[in-house]
């Protein structure tokens, strides 16, 4: 996204998460929704369809504020060897800020620095101090563990013959981004950090890319594997927390009016 698009996106987010609004606000409810279903939607088949609907709800909330805003994806594989060098971590008012600082690892710069969070797993904030957005890069001197470059990710996409193999290939590197950023991103309330949505938009794009690799089109109806508890998954499953939306309804991001998007 160019600088104008980025500023509009961040401005819409700041209005959605206006600290002057009554809390919990609309954004807080989104964060809570992820927190409520966190243990069910990971480490199993639901991770991709569930987050597809979730990030589309976030985009829809932004578009109520500014209809021109769309949710960008963050291709973190471009800086996979040295993630902390990604430009998203710049500290200007039209960027997303860098590593946390101080005893609570609050993000001190960027467009998100002054936005308090409502839901948090951090319980050590002093009385009267609003919880902050936290990041705690997992290596010394403000660096992070190495992620993965595009060449590795594309190799995994080509090697995955079915949905379960795709999930098993992509979910671990997805987790690495969460655990390396740490802070809020490594909790059930990860959506407190706007980078969560950019990260999951990229994961969502990889799902689309993998489906498009099969020219027969069969992957647009393919969904298999298990839930975290070992029970079998099926395309007709209702997506947890979204009444009457089935997995099969959202596998093709262009076939459902609720979604209706493609990736550039």
Image: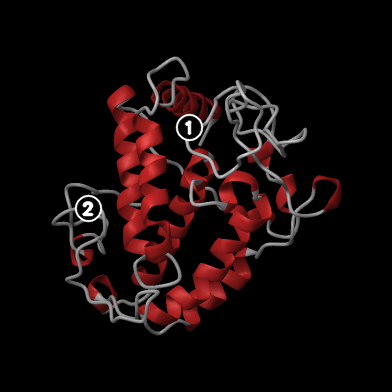
| Residue 18 drawn at (x, y percent) | 44, 20
Crowd class of label 2 (few under 14; some 14 to 19; many from 20; radius 10 Å): few
Q: For mark 1, what is the residue?
A: 118
Q: Which residue corresponds to the image point at 53% horizontal and 77% vertical from the top-left?
A: 156
Q: Is residue 229 above or below residue 54?
A: below
Residue at the right extreme of this rendering: 141
Specify which label sits upstream in the sequence, 2 or 1. Answer: 1
Query: How far apart are the two marked residues, 2 and 1, measured between alpha carbons?
Result: 23 Å
Of 156 and 217, which appears nearest the observer?
156
On residue 242, which mark appears? 2
Please tell me whether mark 2 sits on a helix, a strand or a loop: loop
Please tell me whether mark 1 sits on a helix, a strand or a loop: loop
Visible in this render: residue 196?
yes
On residue 141, which mark appears? none
Taking the image as shown, residue 188 lies to the left or right of residue 44, namely: right
Q: Is residue 197 above or below residue 11?
A: below
């Amino acid at each position: 996204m160019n600088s104008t698009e980025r500023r509009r996106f961040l401005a819409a987010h700041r209005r959605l998460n206006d600290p002057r609004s009554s809390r919990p606000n609309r954004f807080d409810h989104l964060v809570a929704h992820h927190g409520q279903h966190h243990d069910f939607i990971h480490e199993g088949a639901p991770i991709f369809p569930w987050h597809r609907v979730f990030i589309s709800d976030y985009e829809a909330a932004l578009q109520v504020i500014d209809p021109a805003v769309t949710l960008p994806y963050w291709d973190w594989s471009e800086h996979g060897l040295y993630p902390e060098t990604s430009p998203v971590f710049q500290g200007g008012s039209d960027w997303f800020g860098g590593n946390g600082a101080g005893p609570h690892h609050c993000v001190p710069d960027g467009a998100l620095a002054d936005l308090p969070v409502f839901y948090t797993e951090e319980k050590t904030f002093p009385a009267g101090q609003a919880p902050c957005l936290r990041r705690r890069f997992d290596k010394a001197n403000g660096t992070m563990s190495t992620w993965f470059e595009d060449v590795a990710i594309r190799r995994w996409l080509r090697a995955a013959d079915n949905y379960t193999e795709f999930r098993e290939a992509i979910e671990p590197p997805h987790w690495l981004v969460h655990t390396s950023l740490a802070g809020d991103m490594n909790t059930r309330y990860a959506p407190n950090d706007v980078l969560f949505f950019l990260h999951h938009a990229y994961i969502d794009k990889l799902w689309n890319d993998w489906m498009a690799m099969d020219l027969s089109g069969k992957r647009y109806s393919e969904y298999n594997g298990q839930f975290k508890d070992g029970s079998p998954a099926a395309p007709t499953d209702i997506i947890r927390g979204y009444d009457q939306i089935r997995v099969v309804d959202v596998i093709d991001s262009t076939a459902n009016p609720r979604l209706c998007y493609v990736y550039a």
